[in-house]
Image (spheres, rainbow, N blue to C red):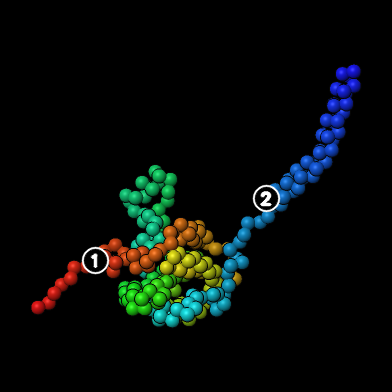
Amino acid sequence: MAEPKAAKSKSSSKSKKHHHQPGDGEASKKATKAKAEATAAPAPSLDAHFKPCADVAGLRFGAQLVTRALTVRRAGPLELPHLLRVAVPDAGTGQDAKDKGTQPLSFAPTTTAYIPTNFAILAHHAWHTLTLGLGTKNSKAAVFVFESAAMKAIADAAWPQVLPLGDVGKRLLRAAPGAPEMARFKFRKGCVTFYIYAVRTARARGFARADELRAVIEAVAKLKDFLDHTAMLALPGQRSIDAAAPVGIVH
């Protein structure tokens, strides 16, 4: 009597297995197909981001009229690494960074940055104080990554050292020498908005400084949100306006 039950249980288990196999096969086929499509999909190209310098989007201000009037200056070679909190390569730190598996970054050869002037920082701080915190304290920085050192040199010679933020679009982007193409990347980091522009020759393919562009974007992306842009823009040796300064009395 027990044998027919065992046979019945075996047949039922076989039928259950047979019933679930087609569904499992279809799911595995779909998963394999999706994986193959993902593998075959081409990597996104930078070409889609590039536009003629006359059409590329500039800095956005909205109702920030005061910010539009404040000035920015061209940063020195060591100021951009400090701004992005990255290591500066030299004879000593280069070997240490190599031992730790990190590569020091140098943006000077093909990168130009514009950051707020000391006056702009003080004016921004004063405006925010006078309006009892209602005035904007947002600041902006523009970073240009060129495809070659020669293109950077030409742009540096043509572009002004200091200009209002509201003129960046007209005097830097639209008036770029050689009418190049640009790709814009925007990052909001608390009180500071970074505008990163990749600059290449018109109708070129790809970007020769893709690694350097990636390094700048990754460095900006890793930054924490800034609650006070004055603390970020205070360079070594430059007194931060947040620091308590000794008061002098003139008799």
Instruction: Residue at 33%, 78% (x, y): give it.
Output: 130
> Is residue 221 in view from this perspective?
yes
Q: Quadrant of residue 191 in the image?
A: bottom left
Q: Residue furthest front?
A: 1
> Is residue 76 in view from this perspective?
no
Query: So how many labels did they put on this image?
Result: 2
Instruction: Residue at 49%, 75% (x, y): give it.
Output: 59
Instruction: Residue at 47%, 80% (x, y): give it.
Output: 63
N-term mark: 2 or 1:
2
Position of residue 201 measured from the top left corner of the image (x, y, whole percent): 54, 70
Q: Which residue is mark 2?
A: 39
The mark found on residue 244 in the picture is 1
Please name the amino acid that badge 2 sits on: Thr
Position of residue 32 measured from the top left corner of the image (x, y, whole percent): 73, 45
**Callout 1: SS:** loop
Question: Distance between the Cα atoms at labels 2 and 1?
Answer: 58 Å
Q: Quadrant of residue 207 in the image?
A: bottom right
The mark found on residue 113 in the picture is none
User: Do the residues bearing badges 2 and 1 touch, measured as CB atoms within 8 Å?
Assistant: no
Q: Nearer the viewer, mark 2 or mark 1?
A: 1
Which one is nearer the viewer's eye here, 183 or 199?
183
Residue 176, compared with residue 31, is above or below; it is: below
Please name the amino acid that badge 1 sits on: Ala
**Which quarter of the rendering shows the N terminus?**
top right
